[in-house]
Image (spheres, rainbow, N blue to C red):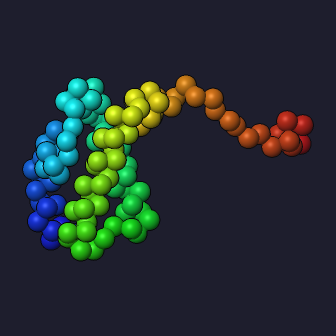
């Protein structure tokens, strides 16, 4: 995959705005300012999920298109929602109700 020219281009990008501009995705600077880390983490999560499922295209043009679509979706997630709702980072999930399984024999002391 490192043979693809656009992957090398991505390695030079450092901000959410640069990624959005590279993929020519129109964006509201206010949305990006507030959610930049969340957008980039969601983008990474989408890429990782697609890679683990073996769904990343092998053709450079198709792969670039997939990256474009995933970044667009990551950005759109935060246009339509917010960081507290999306809970991209673990810190937002820490206070959710936790469930723990305790076998009956442990309760009975067996």
Q: Residue furthest bottom?
A: 59
Query: Considering only vertical position in the picture, is 51 above or below 107?
Result: below
Query: Considering only vertical position in the picture, is 26 above or below 93?
Result: below
Q: Is residue 13 left or right of residue 53?
A: left
Instruction: Give the x, y percent position of residue 38.
Output: 33, 35
Q: Is residue 106 left or right of residue 50?
A: right
Q: Is residue 8 left or right of residue 97?
A: left
- Could one spot residue 91 in this view of the protein? no
Res 104 quadrant in image: top right
Q: Nearer the viewer, residue 36 or 109?
A: 36
User: Residue at the spot x=17%, y=51% of the render?
Assistant: 23
Q: How many numbered discs? A: 0
Instruction: Give the x, y percent position of residue 6.
Output: 13, 61
User: Residue at the spot x=52%, y=29% of the render?
Assistant: 94
Q: Nearer the viewer, residue 3 or 78?
A: 78
Q: Which quadrant is home to the C terminus?
A: top right
Q: Which quadrant is home to the N terminus?
A: bottom left
User: Residue at the spot x=30%, y=55% of the render?
Assistant: 69
Query: Considering only vertical position in the picture, is 106 above or below 69?
Result: above
Res 81 quadrant in image: top left
- Could one spot residue 30 in this view of the protein? yes
User: Residue at the spot x=44%, y=27% of the render?
Assistant: 84
Instruction: Give the x, y percent position of residue 67.
Output: 26, 57
Q: Nearer the viewer, residue 32 or 93?
A: 32
Instruction: Give the x, y percent position of residue 87.
Output: 45, 34
């Amino acid at each position: 995959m490192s043979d693809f020219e656009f992957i090398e281009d991505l390695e030079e990008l450092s901000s959410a705005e640069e990624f959005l501009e590279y993929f020519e995705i129109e964006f509201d600077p206010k949305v990006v300012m507030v959610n930049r880390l969340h957008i980039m983490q969601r983008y990474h999560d989408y890429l990782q999920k697609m890679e683990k499922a073996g769904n990343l295209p092998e053709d450079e043009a198709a792969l670039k298109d997939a990256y474009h679509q995933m970044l667009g979706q990551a950005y759109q997630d935060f246009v339509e929602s917010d960081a507290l709702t999306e809970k991209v980072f673990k810190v937002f999930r820490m206070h959710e109700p936790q469930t723990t399984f305790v076998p009956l024999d442990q309760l009975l002391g067996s």
